[in-house]
Amino acid sequence: MPSPAKVLFPLNSYKLSHSRFYLLKPNKHTESSNSMLIFVGMGLWDEKDITCKGLEIARRSDEVYIEFYTSKLMGTNLDKIEKFIGKKIKMLERSDLEEKSRWIVERAKDRTVTILTPGDPMIATTHSSLRLEAEKRGIKTKIVNAGSIINAVCSLTGLQNYKFGKSATVSWMKSRVPLDVIMQNLSINAHTLLFLDLHPKPMTIRDAINILVDTGDVGELFAVGIARAGSENPVVRCDRLERLKSYKFGDPLHVIVVLAKLHFMEYECLRVFAHAPEELEEIVE
C-alpha cells in the first residue's frame, strides 16, 4: 500500500499538474531555489541612496525592474541608475503593478527578479499586494529596506514619531478625505502627514494648501512644509497653512505635516530646524 505522502503528492502528479500541488500546499515554495521576487528600496533622492545590500542584490539578479508610479527619485533618472548598478533595467507601468501584475510574478518562478522602488518598498500598498500574490503562488519574496519619507520627516523636523496619526494624500481630484483625516487626528492630538499627488504632475505645497483651504476652514492651523527630503538642499518651513502658501519651497517632491499639540522638544526643534514663528508656542502642551 502506498504511503500517505505518495497518495497526496505522487511524483508524476507534480510534473504533470503543478496546479494540484499548489492547491494542496499554497504556501510551500515549489520552484527553483534560485527563484525569488525581491523588492529593493532606492531611498529618497538619487541612485546613491540605495543600500549596499540592495545594490549587491540588484547586480546579481537575473532581471531588474523599476517603478516610478508610487513615488519618484527627483535627483536621478533611469540612465544614471542603470550605469550605477551596471545592469539594464526595465521600467514598469502602473498596470504592471496592479491589474497586469501576474506576468512579473510568473517571471520569478525560475529566476531572481528584483523590483526597485523609490523610498522603502512596503510603504506603498501596491507592493504589498504584489508580494502577497507571489507568496500565495509559492514564490519566495524578500524585502530590502531603505530610507522613506516617513522617517525623513521626523529627522528633518524633530517631530516625534509616536505623535503621528493616520496619513492621507491630497489629490488633484478634490476630496474631503484629507480634511477628515486631519480633523480625526486633531481629535486625538496627533500630527497628520499629507502626501501630495504625483499624477499628472507632482503637486506643490501651494497647490495642496489651496485645495485644503477650498475644502474646509484650515488656513489658521500650524503646519510644516518639506521639500526635497533626502537631497543636499532640503527645505523645511513651519507656519500657519495660509502663510506657508506664499513661501517659495522650490522644486518637488513636497509633503506637509499638519500639527497637533506639541511636546516642548518638538517646539524647540521646529523653531531651530523649520524657522517656526514664536506664536507656535500657542500649541505647546
Image (cartoon, rainbow, N blue to C red):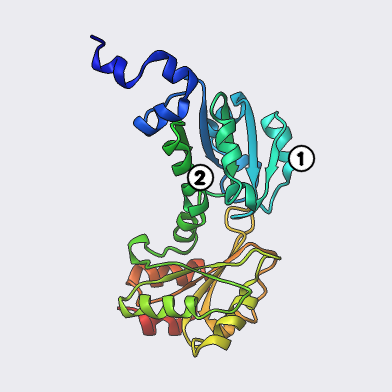
Q: Position of residue 49 (x, y in %)?
A: 59, 43
Residue at x 49% of width, y 90% of height: 217
Where residue 190 sits, quadrant-wise, is: bottom left
Residue 79, labelled with which disc?
1
Q: Are marks 1 and 2 in contact (CB under 8 Å)?
A: no
- Rate crowding at label 2 as few (under 14), some (14 to 19) or many (20 or more) other CA atoms within 10 Å: many
Where residue 52 sits, quadrant-wise, is: top right
Query: In this rendering, which labeled residue sits more in front, label 1 or label 2?
Result: 2
Total number of numbered discs in the rendering: 2
Asked whether residue 121 appears in the rendered view, the answer is yes
Furthest residue in direction right, as rendered? 79
* Spatial separation of the CA atoms under disc 1 and disc 2: 26 Å
Question: Eyeballing the image, is 148 above or below 173?
Answer: above
Q: Position of residue 278 (x, y in %)?
A: 45, 82
Secondary structure of the residue carrying numbered label 1: helix
Residue at x 37% of width, y 75% of height: 185
Question: Eyeballing the image, is 162 above or below 181?
Answer: above
Question: Eyeballing the image, is 226 above or below 45?
Answer: below
Query: What kind of residue is marked 1?
Result: Asp
Which quarter shows the N terminus?
top left
Residue 130, labelled with which disc?
2
Q: Position of residue 165 (x, y in %)?
A: 37, 68
